[in-house]
Amino acid sequence: MATVPGIDVSYWDAGIDWPKVRATGQRFMIAKATEGITYKDPTFDDNWFGAKSAGLLRGAYHFFRCNVDAKKQADYFIDYVKTVKDNGELPPVLDLETNDGMTKDKIVAGAKVWLDRVEAAFGKKPIIYSGQYFLQDYLVVAGGGPPVWAKDYPLWLAQYPNQYVEGMKPALPRGWFNYTIWQYSDKGVVNGINAKVDMNLFNGTLEELYKFAGADIPDQKPKTHTVVKSDNFESIANAYGVTVRELVMANPQLLNVGDKLTVPVAIAIPQESASTSAPTTGPGNSDASSTPKRTYTVKAGDTLSLIAVKHSATVAAIASANDIKNINTIKVGQVLVIP
C-alpha cells in the first residue's frame, strides 16, 4: 500500500528546522492558520515559508468553532492566509473537533457555509479533518449518515492506533468510504522539531500526492557534494533535504575529506519510528498486535547515524527511546532500544 509521510504543525511546534524535517522523509505539512474569529497562529508565516524553502508541499487549516458565525470564520481564515500572498499547494482544511454545545443541524449547516466560501476564495475543494466519532455523532443528517455533499470532500481522518504497523488503515466512520490523509499519531518524533508532533500518511503515491496538490514534481538530478572535515552523513543529508538512508545507499563508502558524494534525488519514505502509544479513537485497530522491542549493541566505529540507517530508523527516534542527550556519546557495548 503506497503512502507518503507528512506532518501538521501549530504554535506548539515553534522553532522548526525545516531542512532537517525534510531530511527525515516528510513530504508535506499542514499548518494551523486560524481558530474561530479571534486567533491567528503566530508561527504560521514561519512554517509556511520555511516548509516551502525546504521543498515540502503545504496546506493551511482552520480550527472551526461551531458556536461562531461560519461566514465570519471563513473570511477570517481567507484574509489571514492570503496576507502571505501564497495560497500553498494543498487544499485548505476545515478542522472539526468540538461541538461547542451546538446541535447537529447547526454544525452541518455551518460547516457547509465555511466549505463553500473557502472553496470560492481558493478555487480548491477543501479537506475535512475530524475524528471517526465526531463525524458519526455530529456531521450527520436525519437517518444517521453524513450529508450527501460530504462525499465530495477529501477526508483527513484522525485515528491513533495503539501501535502503528506498516500497511494498517484507519476504520472509516459510518457512511464514509474513503480517506485521503490519515493522522495516525499525535506523539511523533521528528528531527528538527523539539516537541511531539502529529504524524500523517497520504493515501497514495508521491505522484498522486503532487497531483492532488495540483503541483508538478520537481525535476531534480543527483547533485555532487565534496566532503569537508566537519562533514558527517547526517549533516550532509540535512543540508540537501534527503534522508541519511538515501545518502548512505548512494554512497556506501566511509567518508574521507575530498571525496565527492552523489546526493540522490529525495524520495518519500514512511517513518516507522513515529508510532505512538496513544489510545485508539475507534474499534477498527483495537486488536493490532504489539511489536517486540528490538535492541542493538554498539560496536567499535558505530555512530547513531549509521545505526539509524542500518535499522531504518532516525537518529532523533533512537536518541529519544534511549534518553540520549548527546548523540555523540554512545559507547561500545551499550545496548540501545531501536524504535
Image: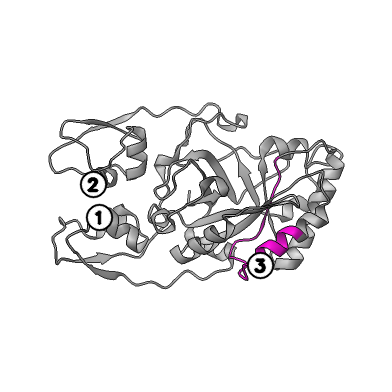
Decide: is 49 above or below 5.
below
Lateral position of residue 88 relative to residue 26, left or right: right
Inspect the magenta stretch and tell me whether residue 226 lies in it: no
| Residue drawn 34% across the image and 72% down it | 221
| Disc 1 residue crowd, few under 14, some 14–19, many 20+, Cα 10 Å | some
Cα gap from disc 1 to disc 2, whole angstroms: 8 Å
2 or 3: tag closer to the N-terminus: 3
Which quadrant is home to the C terminus? top left
Does label 3 or label 1 sit earlier along the sequence?
Answer: 3
Q: Mark 1 is on which residue type?
A: Phe
Residue 299 location, quadrant = top left
Q: Which residue does the numbered mark 1 point to in the structure image?
A: 233
* Mark 3 and mark 1: Cα distance apart in space: 39 Å
The answer to whether any part of residue 313 appears in the image is no
Residue 43, image x and y in percent? 56, 55
Determine crowd level at label 2: few under 14, some 14-19, many 20+ residues with C-alpha closer than 10 A.
some
Which residue matches tag 3? 83
- The CA distance from mark 2 to mark 3 is 44 Å
Can residue 276 be seen here? The reply is: yes
Badge 2 is on which residue?
306
Residue in view at x 58 percent, y 65 percent: 89
Report the magenta residues as a range.
Answer: 76-97
